[in-house]
Image (spheres, rainbow, N blue to C red):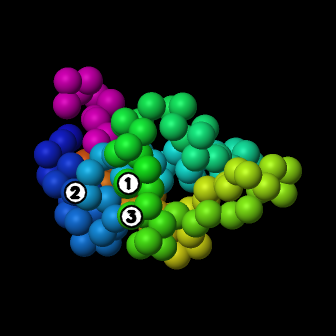
Amino acid sequence: MKLFAGLRKIREYQRGRLPFVRSLVEFDIVIEIGYAEECGEPITLKQLELLRICSRTTLRRKLAQLIEQHVVQRRKNSDDRRAQMLGVSPASLRLLTRYGRMLTTIARDHFTHDSRNPMA
C-alpha cells in the first residue's frame, strides 16, 4: 500500500482539473447537490442549509461562487415557484465523472492491500 503517494496523486488531480474545489466546503456542497440529483430528488437551498455543511452565510457565499463559475445551476421548481432546484452543470458532471474514474484507478493501485499480508 502506498497511501501517501495515492493521496498526493488525488490532490494533484483536484488542483489541476477541479478548480472549483478550493476547500472541502465547496466539494461537500457539490457532492450533496449531485447526490440528491443522482437519487432523483434535486435539492433546494433550504434543504442544503438543513444539511449543516457550514454556516448559512458561508453556504450562500460558496454556492453563489459555484453558480458564478457554472459548476452549479439553479432551475425553477415546477411544484413551488418560490423554490429553486440546484443541480450540477453538465460540464462539471463530466469533470467529476473523470475524477471518479481516476479515484478508482488510484484506489486499485495504491490502497488495496495484499491479502496474504493483512498488515500491508
The kind of residue tagged 1 is Arg
Q: Are marks 1 and 2 in contact (CB under 8 Å)?
A: no
Residue closer to the observer: 10 or 17? 17
Q: Alpha-carbon distance for marks 3 and 2?
A: 21 Å
Residue 108 seen in render: no
Q: Which of marks 3 and 2 is in front?
A: 3
Labelled disc at residue 61: 1
- The residue sitting at 81% across, 49% down in the picture is 80
Residue that carries the numbered disc 2 in the rendered image: 11
Residue that carries the numbered disc 3 in the rendered image: 65
N-term-proximal mark, 3 vs 2: 2
The stretch in magenta equals: 111-120
Q: What element carries label 2?
A: helix
N-term-proximal mark, 1 vs 2: 2
The kind of residue tagged 2 is Arg
- Please state, as top left, top right, bottom left or bottom right, where the C terminus lies in the image: top left
Residue lying at the far right of the rendered structure: 79
Q: Residues within 10 Å of mark 1 (few under 14, many from 20)?
A: few
Residue 49 lies, in percent from the top left, at: 51, 37
Q: Do the residues labelled 3 and 1 touch (CB within 8 Å)?
A: yes
- Please state, as top left, top right, bottom left or bottom right, where the N terminus lies in the image: top left
Q: Are marks 3 and 2 in contact (CB under 8 Å)?
A: no
Which corner quadrant of the image does residue 85 belong to? bottom right
Vertical relation: 93 (above or below) 31: below
Residue lying at the far front of the rendered structure: 82
